[in-house]
Amino acid sequence: MASADTSLLRGAPFDDPAYLPSRIPSAYNPLHTFELPKGAEKHYHQQYADLYFLRLAQLKKAVKQRAEEAWGDFTLGDEKARMVDRVLDVRQGELCWVVGTVYMELGLKPNILDDIAKEHWIAAPPLRETYTSQSGHDGMMLEDESGRLRVFGESLSSTSVTGCVLAALGTEQSDGTFQVIATQYADLPRQPQRWERDDSELAMQKQNPPKRERSGKIAIVSGLDMTGADDDDLSLGLLVEYLTGELGGPPDQSKASRLSRLIIAGNSLSHASPILSRDDFNAKKAGKRHYGYDASSYDPAPTERLDQFLADILPTIPITLLPGETDPANVALPQQQLHPALFSQSRQYANPPAQSNESREGLDSVTNPWEGDIEGYRVLGTGGQTVTDLLKYVEDVNVLDVMEMMLRWRCVAPTAPDTLWCYPFQDDDPMLVKDCPHIYFAGNQKKFAKRVIVGPADQQVLLVSVPKFSETRCVVLVDMETMGVEVVKIALMQPKS
């Protein structure tokens, strides 16, 4: 935690503390958008179809407005395009446009109904690199509360996945399919001004905004993949020394002092517990167990190593911790916070439960996805599952293209609950992007990439693909004043043979 003189970086034992650089404080105001109800209020009795209808109802107005602006005066030959309210109201040969939710029918997409038909004991489905097949049987449909309409067209080839809401312009063919010649989607929503939420909360409390100094940088790392083995110690130790300012001399310490917050974007631990197949379960059941629990299968080393890692960093820099696919959190999105019982050492740096507008200066264990305000800018981030799953629907599209389309569709997880497990929301879909972020990052990607996209109202969003640290040894730094991005590689030089 911060000391009274704000000297956060550690120096040599006999250095004069007056010469130590001071850590730039972090202006941090998290949101609780993706937190699920507690206790009996959280249940899974609802139908998932309601989530699609809810998504369509919340986005239809924005999509319709964009389509009217684009096609209000559009004519083909002597025929003017008109809107139809439902997909089943489309008539053959008429030029029209309709709003609906996309459903992709893909040959390699996992189907839970097929698994149930084979056996009642369901094992985890095998990992697939892609859902598209080469058989030519893949198809696309547009659906709403009235029914489904099969659609095709070149404009749909690489920009549409299950769950996205769009408007399609075209004509119905003699075989009942709808040939699409153009599409429109909601595009980026309104983007809040910098410090808008912080200043409004102070105004409600009848307080004047504080005088704000130049902002620092945030460090984003993902895919630590801790196993508890000795192989992790060297690279993770160097990462700790870099973040705490112990690596290098005074110039390096001065640069490290500009880091105001660390974000760990999922997959901090290496392995999750898979669902056993029936044969494996029976073999395990026949073994020696005590009250249904096999103590020999539990390895506390990875969790203890993560706890020690956090405890080494937290005295000097606050941390926002997102769970990931391999972390001990619920599988269904949105993943909830990692339980504080996992962190016997580092949880002493976590603030007690607080109101949603309280700034946290220690360990903040959050959800995945997550959003909040850092240095007045809206930041949205995920552990990467949503991006990885969406890439299986499309071909010849990179990570940044997928991230951009998610924002323009205004949905951070369009493929949930089709191929991503998700909580069955009934009243509101938190996966919808209601406020345009200034920064959108996705963790656990294959390589680093960045892009700035611009919206119809001059919104600017910085997209950042954060690579796995366990594979690339890279940490991404974002300057919260200039929005500049740089990558620091934590690795040892191999000796020349």
Image (cartoon, rainbow, N blue to C red):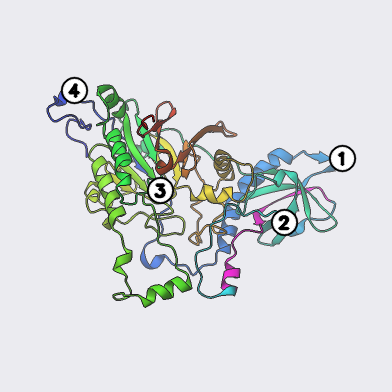
Give residue 77's position: percent from left, percent from top: 87, 40
Q: Which segment did they paint magenta? A: 94-117
- CB within 8 Å, label 1 to label 3: no
- Front of the two marks 2 and 3: 2
Choose the circle earlier in sequence order: 1 or 3. Answer: 1
- CB within 8 Å, label 2 to label 3: no
Q: Where 409 sits versus 141, above or below?
A: above
Mark 1 burial class by Cα count in 10 Å: few <14, some 14-19, many 20+ = few
Q: Where 497 sits versus 265, above or below?
A: above
Q: Where 431 sits versus 262, above or below?
A: below
Q: Amino acid at mark 3?
A: Gly
Could you say which is closer to the camera, residue 157 or residue 97? Answer: 157
Left-right relation of 376 to 106: left
Could you say which is closer to the camera, residue 85 or residue 5? Answer: 5
Say which element carries label 2.
loop
The residue where tag 1 is placed is: 77
